[in-house]
Image (tube, rainbow, N blue to C red):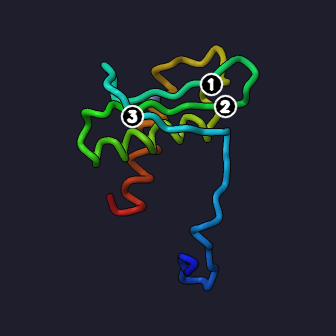
């Protein structure tokens, strides 16, 4: 049986269809920060998101969204921009996303 989701506008999405984006893998492990994302290998085109396995589920989700926003905005490729500015923007967008999906 196929799992599908139908949106208000009638758009139907097949949940069995998987999409690969940035060749991404998410790894939970014991780490000193909540999360991080990085390119995996110099020219592999692969990315990894690491999430601290000790976090409660809610914080894991928040951290995952935060790191996804970094990847989506191309923050890893930005050069010469202040890390603090990037983190502040990412934090605000994460809060907006969490609000918009009611979390
Ligand atoms: Zn960040």
Number of residues whose C-alpha sits closer than 10 Å to that of mark 1, classed few (under 14), some (14–19) or many (20 or more): some
Indicate the secondary structure of the residue bearing disc 1.
strand
**Sequence-first tag of 1 and 3:** 3
Give the side of residue 98 with respect to residue 86, left or right.
left
Q: Position of residue 58 (x, y in %)?
A: 28, 48
- The residue carrying mark 1 is 39
Q: Where is residue 23 in the image (x, y as percent from the top left)?
A: 66, 39
Marks 2 and 3: in contact by CB < 8 Å? no
Give the side of residue 62 with respect to residue 44, left or right.
left
Question: Can you tell which mark lies on residue 28?
Answer: 3
Figure quadrant of residue 34: top left
Nearer the observer, disc 1 or disc 3? 3
Number of residues whose C-alpha sits closer than 10 Å to that of mark 3, classed few (under 14), some (14–19) or many (20 or more): some
- Residue drawn at 31 percent across, 25 percent down: 30
Marks 3 and 1: in contact by CB < 8 Å? no
- The residue carrying mark 2 is 46
**Sequence-first tag of 3 and 2:** 3
Marks 1 and 2: in contact by CB < 8 Å? yes
Quick check: which quadrant has ligand 1?
Answer: top left
- Residue drawn at 73 percent across, 26 percent down: 44
Tell me if residue 48 comes above or below residue 18 in the rendering.
above
Q: Position of residue 2 (x, y in %)?
A: 58, 78
């Amino acid at each position: 049986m196929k799992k599908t989701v139908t949106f208000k506008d009638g758009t139907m999405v097949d949940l069995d269809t998987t999409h690969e984006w940035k060749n991404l893998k998410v790894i939970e492990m014991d780490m000193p920060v909540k999360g991080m994302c990085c390119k995996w290998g110099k020219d592999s085109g692969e990315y990894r998101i690491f999430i601290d396995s000790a976090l409660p589920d809610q914080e894991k989700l928040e951290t995952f969204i935060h790191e996804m926003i970094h990847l989506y905005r191309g923050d890893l490729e930005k050069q010469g921009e202040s890390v603090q500015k990037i983190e502040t923007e990412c934090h605000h967008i994460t809060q907006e996303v969490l609000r918009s999906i009611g979390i």
